[in-house]
Image (cartoon, grey):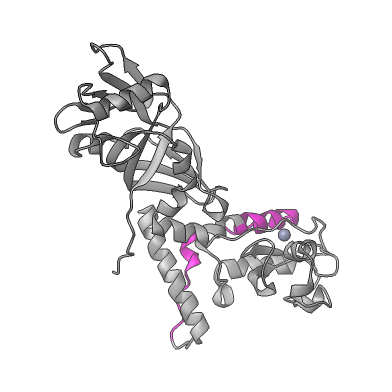
Amino acid sequence: MNRVSVVTTPERRYVERPVELRADGETLPRTLVGYAAVFDTWALIGSGKLRFRERIARGAFAKTIRESDVRLLVNHEPAPVLARTKNGTLQLSEDDVGLRVEAVLDAENPAVAAVIRQIQRGDVDQMSFAFDVIRDDWNTDADPPERTIREVRLWDVSVVTFPAYEETSVHVRMDERVRQLLEERGVVPEDVSDELAPEDTPWERPNLSDFTDKPWDELSVAEKRRIAGHFAWAASMPPERYGDLKLPHHDPATGRVVWRGVAAAMAALFGARGGVDIPSADRRRVYEHLARHYRQFDREPPEFSSASWYPAPRAGEEPPDVRASVVARRRNLLLVRMKLWR
Ligand SMILES: [Zn+2]
C-alpha cells in the first residue's frame, strides 16, 4: 500500500507554570526545577479551520525519557546548552502533574550564569518543549476537534522568553496529515426553519433560481447564509458558490423541513447515487443534523456507519474525470484516516 508522506518538523508547546531555582549555589543557584508539560489539561491550538483542542496523556513521555538524549536549552536555540540527559545534568521524569524537569546548571559558565540571573529576576520564567508526535488520537466529531497526544519523541526542553509566540505559530509546524484533514472541514449550517412540511410533500433538488432571481455574487452575506440554512453542509460560511452547498432538505419557498428531502440527503450521505463529496471529518455532524429531522418526523434514523462512507465504484461503470478525482480524493482521505486512527 502507498504510504502518505508526512512532513515532520518538531512541534512546540509551553506551560504557564513558572520555573523555580533552588538557592543551593555559592553565588548563584545551581538547580532548576520546573514542568515542561502538564498532563490532561485541554489547550486551544491554532486558529480558524485549523483550530483544535489538545491534551497530553500520562505516559506520553515514558519511552522518550528512557531513549532520547535531551538538552535543556534557551528558546530552543542550540546554544547555550544548560544541561543534558546523557551526562546526567538533566533529569526528566513523569509525575502526577506532567513532565518534570530538574537540571544542575554550571554557574561558572558566563553564558549559563546570565540565564540563571534572567530567571532569578523573573525576566524568563516559563518552559516549553519541542517534540514529534509518535502516537495521537483525533476526535474529529468534536467541535473544535480534539487531539490526545499518547506518545512523543522529545527534542529539547527550553526556558523561553516568548511562549505565546509558539502558540500563534503552531499551525505552520502542524503535521501535514492533520492540516489536510482539518482544512477539508466544512460547516453544518444552522437550519433556516424548524417547521415541518406535510410528510407527503414532494421533493426535488432546488436550484439557485428557486431561492432568488439574483446571481450568487450579488447576494448579501445574510442572503447567502439564509440559503445555506436549507442545506446540511457548506464548504465555508458564507459559501463562495452555490455549488459549495450540499444535501438540501428544506423547502426553498417556506424553509420547512421536507421529509423526502431529509431521506434523500441521508441516503446520499451513505453513498446512494454516487454519494456526496464531503470530508469524512464532517460526516458525523451532518449525520446528527439529519438524524434530528428523522426524529422530528417520528422516524428512526439509520445507524451511523463509517464503513459505508467509501462506496466502491460499480463494475462496468465508467465514471467521468470529475468523479474519478473525487474517488481518488476519498481514497487519500481514507489513507489519512487509517494513519490517524490506526
Ligand atoms: Zn435541516
Q: Quadrant of residue 154?
A: top left
Q: Residue at x 50, y 66 (%)?
A: 309
Q: Residue at x 44, y 88 (%)?
A: 316
* The one of 77 and 323 positioned closer to us in this rendering: 77
State whether residue 157 is above or below residue 296: above
The spot of residue 305 in percent (x, y) is 51, 59
Q: Is residue 227 left or right of residue 39?
A: right
Q: Residue furthest front?
A: 110
Quadrant containing the C terminus is: bottom left
**Residue 278 is covered by the magenta coloring:** no
* The one of 204 and 299 positioned closer to us in this rendering: 204
Q: Is residue 139 left or right of residue 158?
A: right
Q: Quadrant of residue 15?
A: top left
State whether residue 188 is above or below residue 32: below
Q: Is residue 132 left or right of residue 272?
A: left
Magenta residues, start to end: 286-315
State whether residue 103 is above or below residue 295: above
The spot of residue 182 in percent (x, y) is 50, 57
Does residue 253 appear anywhere in the picture?
yes
Quadrant of the rendered image holding ligand 1: bottom right
The spot of residue 205 in percent (x, y) is 72, 76
State whether residue 107 is above or below residue 155: above
Q: Residue at x 43, y 75 (%)?
A: 328
Does residue 96 appear anywhere in the picture?
no
Q: Residue at x 37, y 59 (%)?
A: 338
Query: In this figure, what is the number of numbered marks?
Result: 0
The spot of residue 311 in percent (x, y) is 48, 72
Quadrant containing the N terminus is: bottom left
**Residue 310 is covered by the magenta coloring:** yes
